[in-house]
């Protein structure tokens, strides 16, 4: 199959990237991060999470962040909403898209939210209905689509089943997420091929963690399966809480560098993302997590 000529990158650093930081990142830093990413030209930025601060204290300032950002026309600002309270916060904050999240692994679902996959998705019904009634985009994320820290392998049918359930809720887009980064290209191709039998590939995104260094290869496999939306995090921000010492999200700079080499358009300014990745890493007092970003920064400094 011919590769897509244009790809949408969903930049997740402000939410997925920062949510596991132990030290609270100041609200003004989060706002500046989003503003820098907006200026770089991203079509979609995951900006905040309206979850209980008890569970995710780093995201407690979601309303302030959403109120403080300079919104770029044409950019979708997404927020995570696990329940009706979260949705109410998201609507009050004028989110363009709300994200619901379930798992393809029964063991993960039971261990994390103490209910089955079917029960977890049933809980999203009122959220989905209210989001649709408010005219807000709805995205469904599928955790552990390529492997689970508790049960190991996840059947492809289980992933397809969650896709069907999300479609029934009215999801505009569905994320196939490799939460612990165990996927390899052949398995990714198999999962994406099965998923796109039941949903238009244009509505499917790939969310890959780089735990075993497979993310770029998995994105290429997804491109070959007709997928044209990918999640990435500036400077590779975001650890993986289920794999000790593991890296988290694939670095946006690395994805952009690869896509540029494939002549695939993104509409994103690569150099601006390199600058942003280096800046946020310095704010967090650590080295940059993108190989491409660090290489460009070193070359500039030489």
Image (spheres, rainbow, N blue to C red):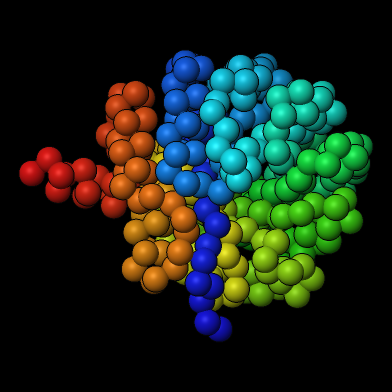
- Residue 193 versus residue 64 in the image, above or below: below
Please indicate whether residue 278 sits to the left or right of residue 51 in the image: left
Q: Kindly indicate the quadrant of the structure image that contains residue 167.
A: bottom right
Q: How many marks?
A: 0
Q: Which residue is drawn at 12% across and 40% down?
A: 301
Q: Which of the two residues, 152 or 178, is positioned nearer the viewer here?
A: 178
- In the picture, the quarter occupied by the N terminus is bottom right
For the point 71% across and 20% down, the residue is 52
**Location of residue 82 in the rendering, given as x and y in whole percent from the top left corner:** 76, 33
**Residue 259 position (above or below residue 76):** below
Q: In which quarter of the image is residue 277?
A: top left
Closer-to-camera residue (288/182): 288
Which residue is situated farthest in the front direction here?
73
Question: With 224 as the anchor, is 270 left or right in this view?
Answer: left
- Residue 66 visible in the snapshot: yes
| Image location (x, y in percent) of residue 13 | 49, 37
**Residue at the location (78% across, 59% down)?**
163
Judge from the rendering whether residue 301 lies leftward or rightward of residue 290; answer left or right: left
Residue placed most toward the observer, 111 or 173: 173
* Residue 4 left/right relative to 291: right
**Quadrant into which the C terminus falls:** top left
In this view, 191 is above or below 237: below
Q: Position of residue 182 (x, y in %)?
A: 52, 57
Pick the residue in front: 15 or 22. Answer: 15
- Looking at the image, the residue that sits furthest to the bottom is 1
Q: Provide residue 255's location: percent of width, then percent of height.
A: 41, 57
At horizontal 85% and vertical 28% (from top left) the residue drawn is 84
Is residue 86 among the parts visible in the rendering? no
Q: In which quarter of the image is residue 274?
A: top left
């Amino acid at each position: 199959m011919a590769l897509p000529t244009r790809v949408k990158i969903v930049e997740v650093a402000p939410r997925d990237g920062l949510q596991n930081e132990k030290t609270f990142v100041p609200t003004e830093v989060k706002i500046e991060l989003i503003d820098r990413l907006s200026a770089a030209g991203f079509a979609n930025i995951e900006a905040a999470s309206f979850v209980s601060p008890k569970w995710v204290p780093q995201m407690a300032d979601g309303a302030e962040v959403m109120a403080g950002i300079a919104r770029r026309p044409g950019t979708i600002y997404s927020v995570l909403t696990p329940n009706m309270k979260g949705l109410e916060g998201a609507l009050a904050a004028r989110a363009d898209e709300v994200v619901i999240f379930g798992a393809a692994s029964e063991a993960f679902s039971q261990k994390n939210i103490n209910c089955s996959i079917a029960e977890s998705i049933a809980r999203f019904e009122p959220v989905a209905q209210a989001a649709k009634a408010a005219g807000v985009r709805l995205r469904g994320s599928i955790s552990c689509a390529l492997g689970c820290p508790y049960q190991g392998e996840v059947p492809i049918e289980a992933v397809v089943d969650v896709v069907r359930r999300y479609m029934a809720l009215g999801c505009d887009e569905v994320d196939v997420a490799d939460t612990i980064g165990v996927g390899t290209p052949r398995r990714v191709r198999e999962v994406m091929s099965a998923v796109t039998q039941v949903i238009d590939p244009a509505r499917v995104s790939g969310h890959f963690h780089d735990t075993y260094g497979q993310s770029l290869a998995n994105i290429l496999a997804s491109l070959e399966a007709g997928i044209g939306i990918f999640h990435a995090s500036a400077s590779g921000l975001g650890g993986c809480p289920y794999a000790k010492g593991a890296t988290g999200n694939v670095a946006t700079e690395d994805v952009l560098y690869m896509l540029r080499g494939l002549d695939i358009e993104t509409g994103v300014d690569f150099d601006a993302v390199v600058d942003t990745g280096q800046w946020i890493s310095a704010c967090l007092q650590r080295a940059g997590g993108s190989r491409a970003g660090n290489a460009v920064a070193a070359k500039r400094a030489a």
